[in-house]
Image (spheres, coloured by chain):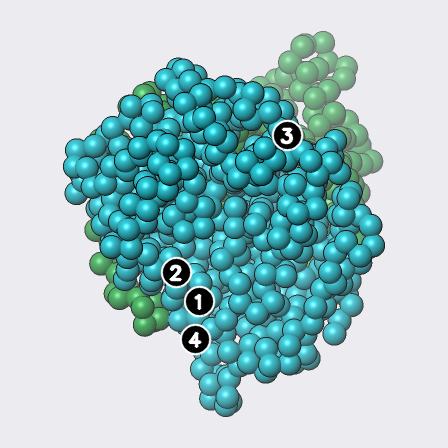
Amino acid sequence: MLLSLIAYISILLFVGISVYKAYKFATMPMHGRMELYPVPKEKGFEHGGSFYEEVSWWSKPHEVSHMREIVEMLKEILFIKKLFENQRPLWWISYALHLGIYMLMAWTMLLVVGVVSELNGITVAATDTGIWGLLVYYVTVATGIVGLALGTLGAGALFLRRVFDNTLKKYTTPQEYVNLLVLFAALFTGILTWGSDLSFHTAREVTANLITFTPFAASGLVTLHVILVGIMLIYIPISKMSHYVGKYFTFHKVLWDNDPNLKGSAIEHQVKKASTFRPSTSWSASHIKPPDAPTL
Amino acid sequence: MINQKDLLPKDMGRKDEQLIKLELDQLIPLLAPYDKPGMESPLTDPKPAWKEKYCTSLDGYVGIDTLTRPKSKEEEDEFVRKFLSGLEKIFSDANNGVLQPLLLTYEYCAKCDTCSSACHIYEATGGNELYRPIYRSEVLRKIAKKYFTTSGKLLGGFVGADIDVNWETIARLGELSYRCNLCRRCAQTCPLGLDNAILSKEIRKIFSQEMGISPVPLHTKGTMNQLRTGSSTGLTKPAFLDTIEFLEEDTEEKFGIKLKFPIDKKGADILLLHNAGEFIAWPENPVAFALLFNAAGLNWTLSSEVLGYDSVNYGLWYDDPQAKKIALGQMKVAHDLRVNRIVMGECGHAHKAAAMVADRMSYGEGKIPVESCFPILWEMVKNKSIKFDPSKNNFPVTLHDPCNVVRQLGIVLPQRNVLKALAPQFREMSHPGVENYCCGGGSGFAIMNNANFPEFRTQVASRVKFNQILGAFKDTISDASIPKYICAPCSNCKGAMRGILEHYDATEKFNLQYSGLVELMVNAMVDIKIPFFEFLEEKK
């Protein structure tokens, strides 16, 4: 029961704190434009161009491709494109960690799917004759093995790189080592816990007990693993490992936000609204008079 | 002094003298023909008088000429107190205009160090730790954590709040904010989309907006001068009108063309805004614009009103309220003239200030659309509204991309199209377009000439650019009979080019020339019977 509570609470806190952080960033005051080219949605993306390459640009339709923006976003999310292009050696280990996490997220969901399937009378096993049971079984096995291996390897390698790289260690605080160790500990105990049964039948049983609040005799290792995963899930959103939240805003609301303030536009509406704000603090240098409107 | 390889962010708090000293042999080598011994002067030490007066304890260079050493413990404490007060304010509603991007960069840096290899100053110094983009950012984070976060107060060094904060720490950090050109090239490479230039600028803002400390060329002789006289050059309205008259006469004398600059023409289609430095240092630029705009039959005007004849906005680099005052003042001039559009001349930061930074400063009827001159210039060529003879530009030409025009506004093709059409020997530098390197003059460096700062600008900040130029002309560089033209369509970039060419004596030795885009266009005009460039006249 206690482990069930830990599982539910940690997932709830992970989602809740992440959403809260996103909400805080989303409701921050409008800022001045700070885009940086190439901007994917722009027609001239290939050469880094913008609507400013047109004469009287404001009198022409602003041709944008949201599809290209989504594609670029997916390249960043799925493959960490910028790191791949600009620092390949680090990409290998960083991507191992990230891909491992993606796989483990899929694995966790597949365990739940497996539990629900079995509750509905579908056997999830290599010996099953139904397509669904086989599919869930094999994808669970694949994502679980790859996820645990890559995630653990990536977290460990990132930690070791920070320890031994003369540059990175100058900038790494003890807390940042802890960040990686928290990930590593949760993932490594995952290998120890589930590694003896790579069909993940045991994992599915434990998942079934956890999500249905069914008391079960958890081993010390299972208990430790669930607690560590719980700590990790709560810790990630309160630490800077919550960059999955920040990254949305840095790209979409800063680097790729080039919507001009045209008459009648939504931006103009926001600018009007922002112009009514009066800051509660002001700068002290003698050349600065109290502002009568915010500086955007 | 510390071996730069051992330098840590917390060393900024050391009481020692100068943290590091740059030596010539640590810098990346210059390309041929500057790869031979003796082709470059050694880097100098700061004078003892500067050490006593300013903060030379960073790297020996003096960027902020109003940052003077305290005379008492009280002054020192007050200096630190003011900085901390300003640091707190950048995270408050006083800084709403940048709060979200600032917090993102402040909070999320993974310290992966991807940004370092994108920085031309870090590269130029052979990877000197002091100039690593995250070095500066990390110092700022350490101070902020120490004073303004619960974790920093409780856990100290565990979360990185392990820096001593004293006069030297803060003064060094202020100086270090002027070792970054704010070119944002590093931000292009960040896997998390973070921007170290934001933090550099925030440090500059704390110094200016809270402490009243900023380089004289940017503030006293820059924005304050501009708000008072109309131009950062000090050019007043009568002096501006005299200059225009002189340029009209001079053009007629030189080229036999009766040139008329339209001034304060109400209801004109275009208000053309130049960097007023052009009228003084490179008057051929506004002349070339006038010749082209007149020949193309555009309905345009210059303004003689205060803030109407100088496009610069140095506030962009160090002080948001100053930037806003200037941008809105320029907008008002355009509105009063009832023009349809403001066209920015060849000045990169002015482009960015008016078109992008000021875009969300106003709304409604008073907001006049801003556009770049480059699409208009390309249209003149494309539409054949002016007759050009490209063979008149038959010498090697390369293009320096101003950061503010390409990376920050996405204007990449029009200027290239003009060059491809009118300069038969046009060749790109390495890293063209949005991947360009800063000229080394960005964010105020081009006009900061106090003490030994020009040495840092020319031999360090502009070093990668100089190598790009040498690389672009490697086929003809050693032949001094062939002029080699650096097209730098930006006033500040031209200032940096001037510094580079003078320092390395490159015009005299290798016939390296620089100027803008419009000058090349006018040189190719069929109606201009004699060369527009003096270096072509001399050759003749």
Camera-near label (1 vs 3) is 3
Q: Earlier in the sequence, mark 1 or mark 2?
A: 1
Vertical order, B106 against B71 (above or below): above
Neighbours of disc 4 within 10 Å: few (<14), some (14-19), many (20+): some
Q: Earlier in the sequence, mark 3 or mark 4?
A: 4
Question: Which chain can be seen in cyan?
Answer: B
User: Do the residues indicated by labels 2 and 3 lie within the same chain of the protein?
Assistant: yes
Vertical order, B310 against B71 (above or below): above
**Which residue is tagged 3?**
B396
Question: Which chain can be seen in green?
Answer: A
Q: Amino acid at mark 1?
A: Val
**Chain that bears disc 1:** B
User: Do the residues indicated by labels 1 and 4 lie within the same chain of the protein?
Assistant: yes
**Which residue is tagged 1?**
B216
**Tags 1 and 2 in contact by the CB under 8 Å rule?**
yes
Q: Amino acid at mark 4?
A: Lys
Disc 2 is placed on an element classified as helix
Rendering quarter of residue B157 = bottom right
Q: Earlier in the sequence, mark 1 or mark 3?
A: 1
Camera-near label (1 vs 4) is 1
Residue A166 locus on image (x, y percent)? 79, 57
